[in-house]
Image (tube, rainbow, N blue to C red):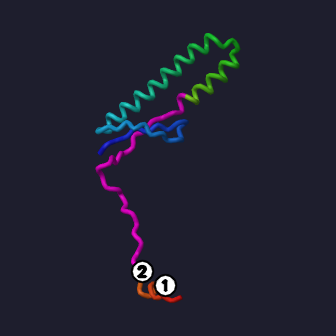
Amino acid sequence: MKWMLVVLVGGVSPVNTDLVFDKFTDCLAAEEQMRQHYADAFEAWDRMAAARIDRRRDYKKARDVEAKRLLNNVGTCVPHGGGDQQPVTAPRQQPPATSSQQSDKAQP
């Protein structure tokens, strides 16, 4: 089975990354790397903001907004069917018409 990394933006909205892994552990490692990237980006922003924003209250508000923007994105690994597997459920077929339904259609 293959695994796909999906990002939940804001912890809610799924975004397909098209990153497919043969092993579940590889997918989890990619998720951890993504999470670390977001944490590093937040730390870099935080250092810059601490140096530029003079008022402590403004800094705290901006920090809270940026933390929500960057740190609420989470990854998850989901099974990926690929193109070579059959769908789990077959499409429903219309049941054949019974003889009483056919005779009803024949009358004007």
x and y percentages locating residue 100 in the rendered image: 45, 88
For numbered disc 2, what is the local secondary structure?
A: loop
Q: Amino acid at mark 1?
A: Lys
Residue 92 magenta: yes
Q: Which residues are magenta?
A: 70-97
For numbered disc 1, what is the local secondary structure?
A: helix
Look at the numbered discs 2 and 1 and tell me whether their residues touch, using CB distance below 8 Å.
yes
x and y percentages locating residue 24 in the rendered image: 32, 39
Number of the label disc, if any, that sits on residue 97: 2
Q: Nearer the viewer, mark 2 or mark 1?
A: 1
Q: Which of the marked residues, 2 or 1, is nearer the chain's N terminus?
A: 2
Answer above or below: position of 21 versus 85: above
- Answer left or right for 81 relative to 102: left
Number of the label disc, if any, that sits on residue 73: none
x and y percentages locating residue 19 in the rendered image: 37, 36
Residue found at the very far front of the displayed protein: 108
x 49%, y 84%: residue: 105
Q: Quadrant of the N terminus?
A: top left
Answer above or below: position of 8 versus 37: below
Neighbours of disc 2 within 10 Å: few (<14), some (14-19), many (20+): few
Residue 75 magenta: yes
x and y percentages locating residue 10 in the rendered image: 55, 36
Answer above or below: position of 46 versus 5: above
> Which one is nearer the viewer's eye here, 106 or 85?
106
- Answer left or right for 95 relative to 12: left
> Which one is nearer the viewer's eye here, 61 or 93?
93
Quarter where residue 48 is shown: top right
x 47%, y 87%: residue: 106
Answer above or below: position of 58 versus 78: above
Number of the label disc, if any, that sits on residue 105: 1
